[in-house]
Structures are given as structure tokens and as C-alpha cells.
Amino acid sequence: MSSLTYIPIENERVIAQHQEYILTNYRLIQFDRGSRTSVSIPLHIIKEYKLTPNSAMFKVTNGIVNVVGAMPKREELRGALGLREFASLTVGGQRKLCEVSGVPFVHPDHPYNQWISVGYHRPFSQHFYRTFAWLKDEEVFTYFPDSFILTNYRLYQFDGKTRKLFIFPLYMIETFEARQNQLKVKATSGKFDIRGKVPRQDHLITVWQQRAWSHLPHEHLDWLVRPINYVVPHHPLSQYAISETSSVRTTHTVTETSHEIESKAGNGGAGTVFVKPVIKNRCDNCGAPMSWEDIDWVGPDQYKCPSCRTPHRVEYTRM
């Protein structure tokens, strides 16, 4: 039997209620049969969701939340999200809402934070979400229970042959080939042959070609392989002075999807991908000639003109 606890914050009101859920203008409180816990999800952190009568997947700012149980009706959730009353919450209001919900408060100025870990997760996924830091704008692209989590920044992979866990930052990967239950990776740190359930080749190509990590500061790339208990003392979030009364602008629009984020794994789009880096012949700003010998590297995918110091981004073409 479910047991929901609801302690409203200022200006919060109930929109819909059921034995297993309470939907308000600020959050969804849901009994999750998978973990047998009460899960509270602030509406302002939801970016995308997939809803069925007996389960739901919420893609939020800092991860995903899976819940199993009697879910709100589609029109109820759409109505609560459509009201957007949560958009009027100040930083202090959002922080309080996240605290009573038991989830991390993430501000747009934070370069990292904790992954959200409420709801139902297998031990493999739970270990990743609780051990490593979430980096700004990182999203889970796809995953397979107990085998891998692929984000737009890295691949967290279990090797069924050696029984070891690997983290592959995507910026370090040079070539890869995924076929059925085998993944071959050539990275700047060496060559790897992974056995077991692995990401599909076309999924790897998609996130690798997006090169989302190119927006990360160079000094933050190391955080992709560091546990969060290493990151926090070296870069405490307390150094970011944020007024509790300031407003927070929500830039994303919540969308309902039929896309399945849990991968079925396989050999979709099989084949090895080879690429070569390309730089501009002349600077876009001053027109000075540029060569591999003269440019100054300022990141894994960025270089500066030797004459005017204008930054440029490396382009990659498939061979």
C-alpha cells in the first residue's frame, strides 16, 4: 500500500490526487512500486517525459527518473506543466522545493552537481549516479540495465569478459566499432575490446558527432572520470554567490515523447567510423594564414589564430 507525504510550500496547491500520486502546480509526488518509495519530482526540472498508465520516464535537468505505478492522466500532467506556475519561483523557492522533494538543486550557473537518483534504478545505474558528478548540460542519451549508460559526454560501460567498469570520455575516443555484443574502442589512452551489451553503433555516432563536450571548459574535462567526492572539495559550489530572491529563467520547453530511452542494444548502423580533424586555411577574423605548426591549442577541439588570437573550432570529416 502506498503512503504519500505532502507538505506544501508557499502558493502550492493540489491539481489532481490519487492513492498513488499527488499532482500540484509545482511538483509530482508519486509512489514508485519499483523502489517502493515516494518520489517527488519538481515540474521545473522536467525537460521531456514518456507517460503510460502504469509507468513513466522523466528526463530532467540532471538525469532521468523512472517510476512504476498508477500514473496521472495525460491531460492532468499536461495541464500542470502548461500552467507554468513554477516559472514564478525564485532561486530560494526552487531550492526549497528541491529540498522538500529530496532532489539536488541545480542552478544554471553551476558547472556540475549531483545526478538525480530517486525512483527505480538498478544497482549498476545507481552506482554511476551516486558516484560521479553530473556536468552542466549533460544528458543521458540511452542506457541498458546493468550494462551501459551513454550520455552526450561519456560512456559508462560494464565489460562482461573482465567484469570491470570503464568510463570512456567521448572526447578521448578516436575510432569505435559496435557489433552485437562487442565494442572495440581506440582512444587516446589505448585500445579496448568490450564484451556484453554495448550501445548501438548509430547511437554512438550520433552523440560522438554532436561533440557536446566541446562546450565544457578544458579544466572540467577531468571531472568526467573523477568521483564527485573528488570534485566537490576542489571546486565547491558554495563559491557561487546566488541571491535567493533572484529569478531563474527556464529556457527549455517540456515535451512529451514516445521515444524509448532504454536501449534494446544491438548492431544498428554497424561499421567502424574513421574521421580526420580539419582546421581553417585562413582566420575568419583577420584573414591570416593558419597551419598545424602555427596554431595555438586552447582545448581538445579549439585553437587560436597565431596573429589575432581569435578562437576557432576544429571540424571533423568522415574518411
Image (cartoon, helix red, strand yellow):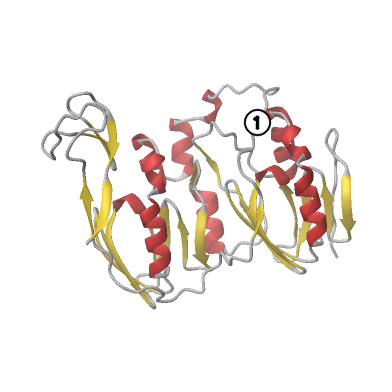
Q: Residues within 10 Å of mark 1 (few under 14, many from 20)?
A: some
Q: Secondary structure at mark 1?
A: loop
Judge left or right: residue 98 versus residue 196: right
Q: Name the side, left or right, on which 18 lies relative to 27.
A: right
Q: Position of residue 58 (x, y in %)?
A: 65, 56
Q: Please tell me which residue is depicted at 56% across the width and 48% down the height of the picture.
A: 115
The residue where tag 1 is placed is 248
Residue 93, given in percent of the width and then of the height, sits at 74, 31
Q: Nearer the viewer, residue 121 or 92?
A: 92
Kindly indicate the quadrant of the structure image that contains residue 114. Answer: top right
Q: Quadrant of residue 65?
A: bottom right
How far across and down, in percent of the image, does residue 89 sit?
A: 74, 32
Q: Is residue 237 above or below residue 46?
A: above
* Image quadrant in which the N terminus is located: bottom right
Quarter containing the C terminus = bottom left
Residue placed most toward the observer, 207 or 120: 207
Residue nearer the viewer, 128 or 50: 50
Q: Residue at x 58, y 67 (%)?
A: 260
- How many numbered marks, from 0 up? 1
Residue 231 placed where, x, y %?
45, 37
Q: Is residue 242 above or below residue 175?
A: above
Amino acid carrying label 1: it is Val
- Name the residue: 16% across, 29% down: 288
Side of 81 where 143 appears, left or right: left
Task: Say left or right for 256 vs 202.
Answer: right
Q: Can you see residue 27? A: no
Residue 282 can be seen in this image: yes
Figure check: 196 above or below 56? below
